[in-house]
Amino acid sequence: QVQLVESGGGLVQAGGSLRLSCAASGRAFSYYVMGWFRQAPGEEREFVAGITWSDNTTSYADFVEGRFTISRGNAKNTAVLQMNSLKPEDTAVYYCNAANTLSGLQELRVFGSWGQGTQVTVSS
């Protein structure tokens, strides 16, 4: 079983930046992918970005439009989401999780337990 802990959310004005971090434990990550998701009030949880652990291939949702960057963190089994040019519509609880493939991540076919997430609030 994979355990994931998110951190780094907060309140920021439109146009600002935030850096989210996800620490994973409990399973070897050499052949898997990690990613970020978000859920706004009253909305379905959706895929935001993913990265493969084997070769750092990345994938982003269309709404990211080049504003976010996912990368592996300096600490082992850590994924970072750098979010720039934030918009009010980016307001949501952000979660991380892992999957076997990027397509699985995009379809929310994840194998980790959903954590508490981290709140991101963007004011206009």
Image (tube, rainbow, N blue to C red):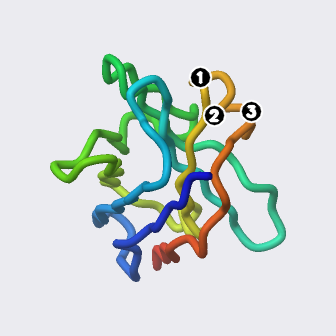
Position of 93 with respect to 69 (left or right) is: right
Q: Residue at x 48, y 39 (%)?
A: 34
In space, the residues marked 3 and 1 are separated at their CA atoms by 10 Å
Position of 89 with respect to 13 (left or right) is: right
Instruction: Give percent across and percent down for residue 51.
Output: 42, 31
Crowd around label 2: few <14 · some 14–19 · many ≥20 (10 Å):
many
Looking at the rendered structure, the kind of residue marked 2 is: Leu
In this rendered view, identify the residue nearer to me: 105 or 19.
105
Q: Which mark is residue 105?
A: 2
Q: Which mark is residue 101?
A: 1
In space, the residues marked 3 and 2 are separated at their CA atoms by 5 Å
Looking at the rendered structure, the kind of residue marked 1 is: Thr
Position of 23 with respect to 124 (left or right) is: left
Q: Residue at x 56, y 53 (%)?
A: 2
Looking at the rendered structure, the kind of residue marked 3 is: Glu
How many numbered circles are shown? 3
Instruction: Give percent across and percent down for residue 41.
Output: 75, 73
Please say if the residues under marks 2 and 1 sit with CB atoms less than 8 Å apart: yes
Q: Residue at x 57, y 49 (%)?
A: 97
Q: Is residue 83 above or below residue 118?
A: above
Q: Which mark is residue 107?
A: 3
Instruction: Give percent across and percent down for residue 118.
Output: 50, 74
Crowd around label 1: few <14 · some 14–19 · many ≥20 (10 Å):
some
Position of 118 with respect to 68 (left or right) is: right
For the residue labelled by badge 3, is the local secondary structure a helix, a strand or a loop? loop
Q: Residue at x 54, y 60 (%)?
A: 3
